[in-house]
Amino acid sequence: MAIINENRMFGDIFKDLRLEKKLSQDRIAEELEVSQGLITKWESHQSTPSPEMLDYIADYFNVTTDYLIGRTDMKNNPMDTLKTMERYKFLMDSDGRLTDEQKEFFMDMIETQHRKFDEAQEKGNVN
């Protein structure tokens, strides 16, 4: 079950993500291959993107579509992040090129992500 933030709409979330990346409306329009006018419409709640564009925007900002439409306040699925980190752990163990300090750093990141995932599961935010 996702945390729903009913006060946040796509336009607000999109604008926040754009500003986090310090992108102008013109620049994000160019990146997404849409008009600047369409960006203005999204941000002022006059229009919403198609499902295909929503997926593209989610990939661009590295967030979930659920986050973009306000269904959850979690930008990323913790399980996806955890799986990626577990792959790095495997590479660390088999590669031999990382220093002990680098391995410890990655292991701390993985452990932190495990805790976040467990907390999200306890809150019902992850299936």
Image: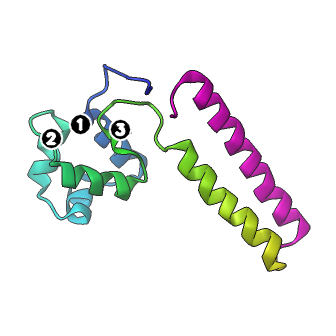
Q: In this view, does 49 lie to the left or right of 16?
A: left
103 versus 81 height, above or below: below
Residue 28 spot, x, y in % from top left: 26, 57
The span shown in magenta is: 98-127
Q: Which mark is residue 11?
A: 1
Residue that numbered label 2 is attached to:
48
Nearest to viewer (mark 3 / mark 1):
3
SS at mark 1? helix
N-terminal label among 2 and 1? 1
Circles 2, 1 touching at the beta carbon (< 8 Å): yes
Q: Quadrant of residue 7?
A: top left
Amino acid type at image mark 2: Thr
N-terminal label among 3 and 2? 2
Q: Which of 29 and 89 is in front in this view?
A: 89
Residue that numbered label 3 is attached to:
66
Asked if the stretch drawn in magenta spans residue 88, the answer is: no
Task: Determine the CA span between mark 3 and mark 2.
Answer: 14 Å
121 versus 76 height, above or below: above
SS at mark 2? loop
What residue sits 29% from the left and 41% below the top?
Answer: 15
Answer few, some or many: residues within 10 Å of disc 1's Cα (few below 14, many 20 plus, some between 14 and 19).
many
Nearest to viewer (mark 3 / mark 2):
3
Task: Determine the CA span between mark 2 and mark 1.
Answer: 8 Å
Asked if the stretch drawn in magenta spans residue 112, the answer is: yes
Task: Determine the CA span between mark 3 and mark 1.
Answer: 13 Å
Amino acid type at image mark 1: Gly
Amino acid type at image mark 3: Asp
Circles 3, 1 touching at the beta carbon (< 8 Å): no
